[in-house]
């Protein structure tokens, strides 16, 4: 069974549609432990110059002030390293991700810890992890739809997660939330059906 890290970033907190879908997923997904990280402006600060500089400094060369500056980055990376499965609950804001989730990414994307540069190019160090991304969107932007080109959420997350070594990434889309109750309910049913298919396979695999 998996050690799960749940990360959510909606401004609506527990009323979030993406978080609700993630909780539905976790009710069905067999796991050993769960660590939950709620991202909000007061818990997930954006990088400042001092922190950015300290993150680029070798650990052996950090002074006391710099160690304090990277303490949050160290904590967030440690959560990722321990987790076997990462569950991201992600609303779409202005065709992309919440700024707090971008701040989290900025803290965990750290040379020498979660990626490194080699003669063959960059190499992600967070390997052998499953990632499930439960997204909620007011419109419909999935592949093959008229507005698919407006989706800067999934391509970005696939790219940055892959850069860090997390290439086993599955998305579940809950779309059409702003298109009326009938469309929202129909699309929620589709999202839950996808969750059922995924967790059926995941439970069977975990039981082996």
Image (spheres, grey):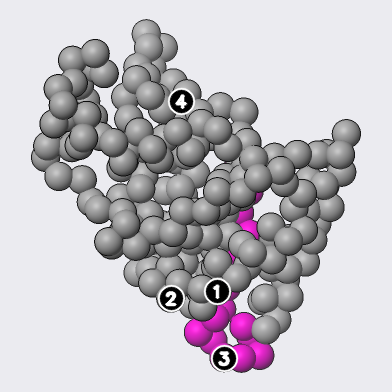
The residue stretch that appears in magenta: 169-184
Residue beneath label 4, please?
A: 124
- Furthest toward the top, the residue is 119
Q: Is residue 90 above or below residue 79?
A: below
Q: Is residue 159 above or below residue 45?
A: above
| Left or right, residue 49 beside residue 144 | left
As measured in the structure, the alpha-carbon distance from the residue carrying label 4 to the one carrying label 2 is 32 Å
The location of residue 153, given as percent across then percent down, is 44, 57
Q: Are marks 4 and 1 in contact (CB under 8 Å)?
A: no
Residue beneath label 1, please?
A: 17
Nearer the viewer's eye, disc 4 or disc 3? 4
Residue beneath label 2, please?
A: 12
- Residue 69 found in image quarter: top left
Nearer the viewer's eye, disc 2 or disc 3? 2
The location of residue 1, given as percent across then percent down, is 75, 39
Helix, strand or loop at label 1? It is helix
Residue beneath label 3, please?
A: 180
| Left or right, residue 131 beside residue 196 | left
Q: Earlier in the sequence, mark 4 or mark 1?
A: 1
Q: Earlier in the sequence, mark 4 or mark 2?
A: 2
Q: Residue at x 55, y 67 (%)?
A: 19
Mark 4 neighbour class, 10 Å CA radius: few under 14, some 14 to 19, many 20 or more: many
The location of residue 40, given as percent across then percent down, is 34, 62
Instruction: Give the camera-side residue of 199 and 176.
Output: 199
As measured in the structure, the alpha-carbon distance from the residue carrying label 4 to the one carrying label 3 is 41 Å
Q: Earlier in the sequence, mark 2 or mark 3?
A: 2
Q: Is residue 68 above or below residue 170?
A: above
Q: Earlier in the sequence, mark 1 or mark 3?
A: 1
Q: Is residue 164 above or below residue 2?
A: above
């Amino acid at each position: 069974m998996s050690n799960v890290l749940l990360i959510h970033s909606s401004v609506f907190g527990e009323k979030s549609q993406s978080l609700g879908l993630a909780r539905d997923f976790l009710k069905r997904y067999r796991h050993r432990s769960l660590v939950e990280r709620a991202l909000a402006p007061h818990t997930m600060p954006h990088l400042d110059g001092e922190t950015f500089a300290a993150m680029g400094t070798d650990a052996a060369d950090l002074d006391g002030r710099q160690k304090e500056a990277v303490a949050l980055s160290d904590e967030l990376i440690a959560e990722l390293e321990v987790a076997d499965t990462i569950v991201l609950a992600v609303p779409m804001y202005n065709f992309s991700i919440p700024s707090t989730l971008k701040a989290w990414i900025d803290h965990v994307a750290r040379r020498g810890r979660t990626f490194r540069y080699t003669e063959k190019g960059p190499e992600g160090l967070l390997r052998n992890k499953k990632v499930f991304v439960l997204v909620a969107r007011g419109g419909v932007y999935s592949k093959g739809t008229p507005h698919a080109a407006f989706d800067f959420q999934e391509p970005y997350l696939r790219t940055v997660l892959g850069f860090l070594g997390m290439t086993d990434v599955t998305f579940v889309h809950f779309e059409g939330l702003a298109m009326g109750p009938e469309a929202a309910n129909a699309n929620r049913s589709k999202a839950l059906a996808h969750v059922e298919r995924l967790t059926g396979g995941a439970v069977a695999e975990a039981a082996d």
